[in-house]
Amino acid sequence: MEDKDILVSVRGVDKIYGSHDDPVYALRGIDLDIYQGEYLSIMGPSGSGKSTLFNMMGALDKPSNGEISVGGISLPKLKSLELSYFRCKHIGYVFQSYNLIPSLTALENVSLPLTFLGRSQEEANERAEEILRYVELGDRLTHTPLKLSGGQQQRVAIARALANNPSIILADEPTANLDLRTGELIIDIFKDLSTKFGVTVICATHDHKMLAISDRIVWIKAGQVDRIQKVADMNINAGSIG
């Protein structure tokens, strides 16, 4: 990956909660580079700081100290409205809980981010339909979330994340609630995005199948990077990582 451009740069990042006299470090001195088109998985136990780091790189939270830049843009220096625009334009989010709007159809859920960026409704609908067909939901355009299975809802969430052609997809345990076949379909979609379209995929997961198609795995422990390994140098199977 070192021959590719660095897209995300994290330098000396701390996240501190609590008082000045009794600080609690969620992150402590994180340094990490992520490359354009890389598929990176993040692992760590509950309370390790994994989710906090995830939120920092997704411009959902700001560090207490340190620098995070995406495509050369310093995220801590952006104001609130600038961060909102940056997230909408450059980052696609896929959450374990889907986070779809229940009253909207699949097409409307996916077209919504496009209208936020000023696309006409006709353009937004055309793009939304294109992406929904890409995730094999072309026959579910007018279905609301309650009329979709969990796997179908997750694919709508992925389509929504892809609507604005983001440079980064952030996925938080995206296969955790899914059956085997649907999980494998979603894994194929993420790998396709990375290898064919150059999208950088950052995934928090413990799914061994997702880990196996990653380029690198970052282990977070006690708010620090414990180790980073290339998947090509590892042996990953359904029961263990070696």
Image: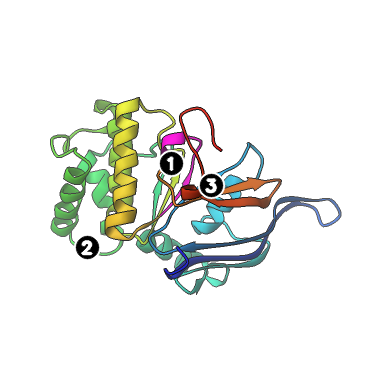
Left/right of residue 119 with respect to residue 37 in the rendered view:
left
Quarter of the image containing the N terminus? bottom left
In the rendered image, which residue does mark 1 sit on? Answer: 212
Question: Residue 84: x and y, percent?
Answer: 44, 61
In the rendered image, which residue does mark 2 sit on? Answer: 119
Over which residues does the magenta segment extend? 201-212
Quarter of the image containing the C terminus? top right
Question: Residue 56: x and y, percent?
Answer: 56, 57
In the rendered image, which residue does mark 3 sit on? Answer: 42
**Badge 1: few (under 14), some or many (20 or more) residues near its Cα, within 10 Å?**
some
Label 2 – label 1 distance at C-alpha: 37 Å
Residue at (42% x, 57% y) in the render: 38
Left/right of residue 40 with respect to residue 127 in the rendered view:
right
Q: Which residue type does callout 1 highlight?
A: Ala
Label 3 – label 1 distance at C-alpha: 12 Å
Secondary element at tag 3: strand
